[in-house]
Image (tube, grey):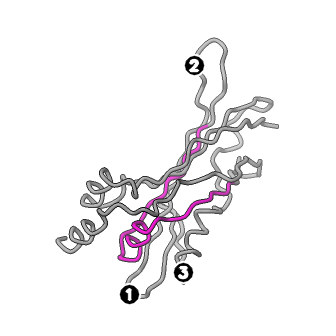
């Protein structure tokens, strides 16, 4: 515990190479037999502080959120779907391999950090809604974002992250319409 605290405190310095955030290059929904799948491409680079954290065995958690609302003229918009998925990027210090794993799902190993980050940048098509959850012929507003989720990190890192902008990596909400056929 003391070693983790010492390591965390060493990341407090402010890095001039801070990332500019996460950009959503493209995003759309596709209809499939299982339901509606999100296809998205994210563009980002980790700053030195976050790379050092992973290389020292501190896992990073990235949460992707999707909200689908249906506009109503007489009241607030109806939230039809609200879904999120968290992916962990970590390094096994014994095998020197990187892991990318979906919480509650599969885990894959990679030789480089860039290969593991590719899972985040081009995620597999994720079923965000069952076919019966959306009404045919209706247009929904879809909002999408990805962020570094600090709710999952250890307490010392969580405290340090509040005072260090290097630990704030997120996209803006990307909004687009989707008409159910």
- In this picture, residue 90 sits left or right of residue 22: left
Q: Is residue 176 left or right of residue 62?
A: right
In the structure shown, which secondary structural element does the residue marked by tag 1 occupy?
loop
At 63% from the left and 57% from the top, the residue drawn is 42
Q: Residues in magenta?
A: 40-67
How far apart in space, not on screen, are marks 2 and 1 (Cα)? 52 Å
- Between marks 1 and 3 in the image, the one whose residue lies nearer the viewer: 3
In 3D space, how far apart are the residues under numbered discs 3 and 2 (Cα atoms)? 46 Å
N-terminal-most mark, 3 or 2: 2
- Where 55 sits versus 95, above or below? above
| Residue placed under numbered mark 1 in the picture | 94
- Residue 74 coordinates in the image, percent (x, y): 63, 11
Q: Earlier in the sequence, mark 2 or mark 1?
A: 2
Q: Residue 19: horizontal and vertical position, in percent?
A: 50, 59
Badge 3: residue crowd in 10 Å (few <14, some 14–19, many ≥20): few
Mark 2 = which residue? 76
In the picture, the quarter occupied by the C terminus is: top right
Outermost residue on the top side: it is 74
Badge number at residue 112: 3
| Quadrant housing residue 155 | bottom left
Which of marks 3 and 1 precedes in the sequence?
1
């Amino acid at each position: 515990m003391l070693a983790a605290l010492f390591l965390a405190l060493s990341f407090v310095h402010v890095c001039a190479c801070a990332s500019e955030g996460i950009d959503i290059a493209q995003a759309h929904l596709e209809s499939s037999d299982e339901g509606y799948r999100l296809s998205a491409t994210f563009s980002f680079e980790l700053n030195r502080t976050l790379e050092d954290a992973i290389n020292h065995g501190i896992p990073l958690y990235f949460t992707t959120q999707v909200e689908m609302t249906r506009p109503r003229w007489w009241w607030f918009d109806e939230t039809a779907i609200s879904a999120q998925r968290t992916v962990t990027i970590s390094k096994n210090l014994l095998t020197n391999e990187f892991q990318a794993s979906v919480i509650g799902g599969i885990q894959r190993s990679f030789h480089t950090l860039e290969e593991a980050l590719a899972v985040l940048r081009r995620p597999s098509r994720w079923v965000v809604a069952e076919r019966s959850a959306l009404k045919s012929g209706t247009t929904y507003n879809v909002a999408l974002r990805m962020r570094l989720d600090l709710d999952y990190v250890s307490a010392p890192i969580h405290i340090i992250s509040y005072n260090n902008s290097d630990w704030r990596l997120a996209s803006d909400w990307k909004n687009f319409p989707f008409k159910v056929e």
